[in-house]
Amino acid sequence: MDIKVTKNPNPQPKPDENNLGFGLTYTDHMFLMDYNREEGWHNARIVPFGPLPIHPAAVVLHYATEVFEGLKAYRTADGAVQLFRPIENVRRMNNSAERMCLPTLDEDDAMQAILEFVKLEEDFVPHKDGTSLYIRPYMFASEANLGLHGIKEAVFAIIASPSGSYYAEGINPVSIMIETEDVRAVRGGTGFAKCGGNYACSTRAGERAEKLGYSQVLWLDGVHQKYVEEVGSMNVMFKINGKIITPDLIGTVLPGITRKSILEVLREEGYEIEERRISVDEIIEALENGELEEAWGCGTAAVISPVGKLAYNGKVYVINDCKIGELTQHLYDTLTGIQWGKLPDTHNWIVKL
Ligand SMILES: *Cc1c(COP(=O)(O)O)cnc(C)c1O
């Protein structure tokens, strides 16, 4: 694929690495590619970062036909830049696109787009410990059409944002509220797809939880509101009596790449893993019996987020004295070690620029 590059004539100074936050500043360029039924994907280009022209009747603005990905570029101690399992993001994006009737991408073209774009923006990958360049590929239906009859035009875009360390203040276990009203996914719905709509409908529960002093909600299944599915926008895992239990991927749970990587590491280390439905009752019982040893959320942004408190029906349960568990810490060290090149990449997960 030929990518036409138009350099930004007004490059910006690099942001202060001590105050990056998340998603606050963007790099000098963006990648764009257009799709229509006649030509397929075409006009791959990297252009100066700026607003997108969009028709007021564009399908995405009315019907939320959009999917996205999130991955990071990491700077290693020797100054090189590397990605973590980017092909997994490309494949998941195509699965998400298929669910939303958006066109899929050629895997090689999508990888080339990500790699060439990050290469061009390499200087924006920060150096400070724990920082990274967050990369956001996304795709949306762009045609002007209030009647919805199959997607005829779409845009694939990649933007990137230098991001600070998620744990600038150290890893503190979070307090989680079990959500008993709203649900984020139902059987046959879009739970497995990384699409904006899943986020739009889960914002309310998150905001309610925040008002009550919790940082995220624990989502229950949409049918019985009984089985645990995810925590905020992360996958969730429990260590009960030495065993690792995590919800299986039955269409309502997002297939996280961090989840997959952690399970691979745990399997190698000989842990017993159960991917299955796990009910709130089972978790509460394990908490009351003192058998729930550790619980954590996992996803690209935080890597691992230990759960210190769980609130359910007006009661608050404490996990591991609200301290990070030994295994949680070990998994965090292992994954971040591989990502930032401090540990050997024995799984071939790393793609260097
Ligand atoms: C992105 C996402 C995750 C985590 O996926 P990773 O590939 O590990 O970053 C988990 N749950 C939801 C709902 C997500 O959108």
Image (cartoon, grey):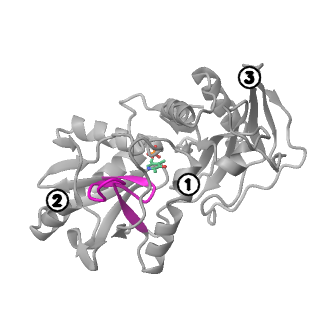
Q: Which mark is residue 282?
A: 2
Q: Earlier in the sequence, mark 3 or mark 1?
A: 3
- Give the quadrant of residue 255: top left
User: Is residue 59 placed above or below 350 in the rendered structure?
Assistant: below
In the rendered structure, the answer to whether residue 192 lies left or right of residue 10 reads left
Percent x, y for residue 350?
47, 33
The residue shown at (42%, 53%) is: 234
Please indicate, yes or no, whether residue 122 appears anywhere in the rendered image: yes
Residue 328: % across, % down: 29, 56
Residues packed near mark 1 inside 10 Å, few (<14), some (14 to 19) or many (20 plus):
many
Question: Foreground: 43 or 37?
Answer: 37
Can residue 337 be seen here? The reply is no
N-terminal of the pair, mark 3 or mark 2, is 3
Viewer-side residue, 215 vs 129:
215
- Magenta stretch? 216-236
Asked which secondary structure carries label 3, the reply is loop
Residue drawn 16% across the image and 59% down it? 282
